[in-house]
Image: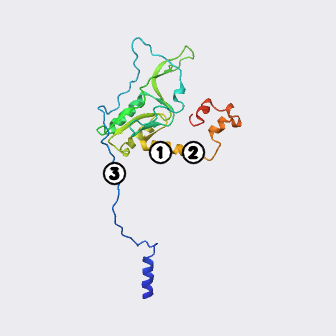
């Protein structure tokens, strides 16, 4: 009987026993709530309606231009940070925004966001670049076609919209992700913390890289005769942007 008692005691006191429970008492610590007293919500909290056609003054005739694809190439050098240091949507690739994309963004935020707590601002101008098009079945030649619509060219890293106010990221994350997926180019919803982590990750990759044969080294030293087959944009951005 004594042996059975010892075996049962040894079984229940073993660290692998599933019936063993250790009571614990303590005080849980939570992060302090965010501080919003220094945030001033402007008088206009909603996005303004974007103009479908730019307004020209006087007797100015709407001009027609070339495709100017360079306006979508490479990184955005100026409007690539959040002014209010909170939340927004950034483009991860080049593209063009039409008027219906502006309306989609504006109406989605109007329905899904509480404008009593937050406000939103545009970080891109209204459509201004003319896109020409010829009618269906028109013969080739005859000069440049007439203006069909206007667009706003966007580069990688451009901030499309910015949302700020007395709200946390999880409250607007779903709405911003939904908008980013419906844009005609690659985009993502971000917060200030996410952008800082992305910049830190990029910096660490450059500093801790052990492979000396990077794209920059290969192109600058013309390895494998790369100057004969690479694009002129690869010489500028070293295969980082299209």
**Relative image position of residue 51 (x, y in whole percent):** 38, 24
Q: Is residue 93 left or right of residue 126?
A: right
Q: Residues within 10 Å of mark 3 (few under 14, many from 20)?
A: few
Vertical position of residue 17 compared to residue 225: above or below = below
Please tell me which of labels 2 and 1 falls first in the chain.
Answer: 1
Residue tagged by mark 2?
207
* Mark pair 3, 1: CA separation: 21 Å
Q: Quadrant of residue 13?
A: bottom left
Task: Assign the C terminus to one quadrant of the image.
Answer: top right
Dot 3 or dot 1, earlier in sequence: 3
Please name whichever residue, 226 or 111, is drawn nearer the observer in this view of the structure.
226
Name the residue furthest top.
59
* Side of 194 where 114 appears, left or right: left
Disc 3 is placed on an element classified as loop
Marking on residue 32: 3
Q: Nearer the viewer, residue 104 or 72?
A: 72
Is residue 226 toward the left or the right of residue 63 in the image? right
- Characterize the local packing of mark 1: few (<14), some (14-19) or many (20 or more) Cα atoms within 10 angstroms: few
Measured in 3D between alpha carbons, the distance from the residue under mark 3 to the one under mark 2, in whole angstroms, is 34 Å
Mark 2 vs mark 1, foreground winner is: 2
Badge 1 is on which residue?
Answer: 197
Q: Position of residue 149 (x, y in %)?
A: 45, 23
């Amino acid at each position: 009987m004594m042996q059975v008692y010892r075996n049962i005691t040894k079984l229940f006191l073993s660290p692998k026993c599933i019936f063993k429970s250790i009571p614990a008492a303590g005080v849980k610590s939570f992060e302090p709530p965010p501080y919003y007293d220094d945030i001033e919500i402007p008088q206009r909290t909603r996005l303004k309606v974007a103009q479908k056609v730019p307004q020209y003054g006087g007797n100015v005739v709407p001009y027609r231009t070339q495709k100017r694809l360079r306006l979508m190439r490479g990184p955005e050098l100026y409007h690539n940070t959040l002014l209010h240091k909170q939340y927004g949507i950034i483009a991860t690739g080049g593209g063009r925004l039409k008027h219906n994309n502006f309306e989609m963004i504006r109406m989605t935020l109007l329905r899904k966001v509480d404008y009593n707590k937050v406000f939103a601002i545009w970080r891109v101008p209204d459509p201004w670049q003319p896109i020409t098009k010829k009618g269906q079945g028109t013969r080739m030649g005859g000069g440049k076609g007439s203006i069909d619509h206007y667009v706003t060219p966007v580069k990688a890293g451009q901030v499309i919209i910015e949302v700020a106010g007395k709200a946390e990221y999880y409250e607007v994350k779903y709405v911003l992700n939904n908008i980013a997926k419906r844009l005609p180019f690659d985009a993502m919803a971000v917060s200030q913390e996410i952008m800082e982590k992305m910049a830190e990750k990029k910096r660490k990759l450059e500093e801790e890289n052990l492979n000396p044969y990077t794209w920059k080294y290969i192109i600058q030293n013309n390895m494998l005769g790369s100057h004969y087959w690479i694009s002129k944009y690869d010489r500028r951005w070293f295969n980082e942007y299209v």
